[in-house]
Every structure is written in C-alpha cells, then in structure tokens.
Amino acid sequence: MITTRWDLLDVVTRIWTHEGEGMMRAISTTLFATLFCALTASAQSPAYTPYAKIDSLRMHWSSHLVVVELENINPGNYNPDNCSKTEYFTQGVAPDKAHEAQLAILLSAYMAGEPVRLVIDGCGLVNAPGIIAVQLTK
C-alpha cells in the first residue's frame, strides 16, 4: 500500500529499473509525477528538534528499538505524523550502515554530553515519533 511519498518512490524506482522499455516507462514517469505532487502537497514535512542534550538513551532487548529522550524537549511538539505515543522519540535499528551511524552518533553525543538535533518523520515501531536523522553541532 502506498501511504507516503517514499513508498511511491520505491514503487516507481522498481518499475523504472525493470527491463521494460517504452510505454511502461512513460506511464510510470507520468504516474510518479502526478502522485508525487499530490502526496507532497498533503504530506507533512519532517520536524526538527532544537539542539539538546540526550537525557535518556535506551535499547530494548525484545525489539530492534532505540528510545531517545532529550533534555527539556517534549516529543509531542515534534510529531508531524500524529503518532499516538509522545513520551519519547524512537529509532528502529535496521541492519544497515545508516542506522549504525545514527546509533553511533547518539551514543557518542550521550557519552560526551554534547547536544544533538533529531529529524523526525513517521511513527516508529511503537507508534512514537520516528528518528530519520541525527545532527551534531559544535
């Protein structure tokens, strides 16, 4: 089911890279342009938290989930997709380099007491605001 612009992009990419030529490619390009514009117009943009120190960082043993709480930041104020749980931010731990890098940044910032900025989009595994990027500042 296509629910976000990223789902749409994935479907069109699969069609586009398929060995089919000609009409299928033209139809997929037109469909992509139309639906992307519609989804982009109605989709929420990611939310950016202010830079803040990590108050709590937990990894659950029963799921691939990292829970992050920032000092003096209410996750409910950075919830572009209206997730039902707003006590914390979550990052799903996928077996890829991007998630490993995000977790490394979170751990390093937590241990050093340095502030981070979280980019939030979508709802995580437990329907809490999901972390899609982590930013550091000096």
Image (tube, helix red, strand yellow):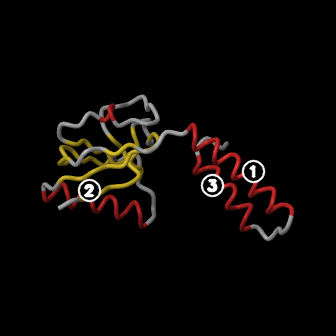
Closer to the camera: disc 3 or disc 1? 1
Q: Which residue is mark 3?
A: 9
Residue 23, located in which quarter of the rendered image? bottom right
Indicate whether 101 appears above or below 121.
Answer: below
Q: Residue at x 24, y 48 (%)?
A: 57
Cα–Cα gap, marks 2 and 1? 39 Å
The kind of secondary structure element at disc 3 is helix
- Specify the label residue 64 is tagged with: none
100 on left or right of 26: left
Q: CA distance from mark 3 to mark 2?
A: 28 Å
Residue 126 point in image, percent of width and height = 42, 37
Quadrant holding the C terminus:
bottom left
Residue 49 location, x and y as percent? 29, 44
Give the label, 3 or 2, closer to the camera: 3
Q: Position of residue 104 (x, y in %)?
A: 29, 62
> What's the residue type where badge 3 is placed?
Leu
Disc 2 residue type?
Leu
Local SS, label 1: helix
Which residue is disc 1 drawn over?
Answer: 31
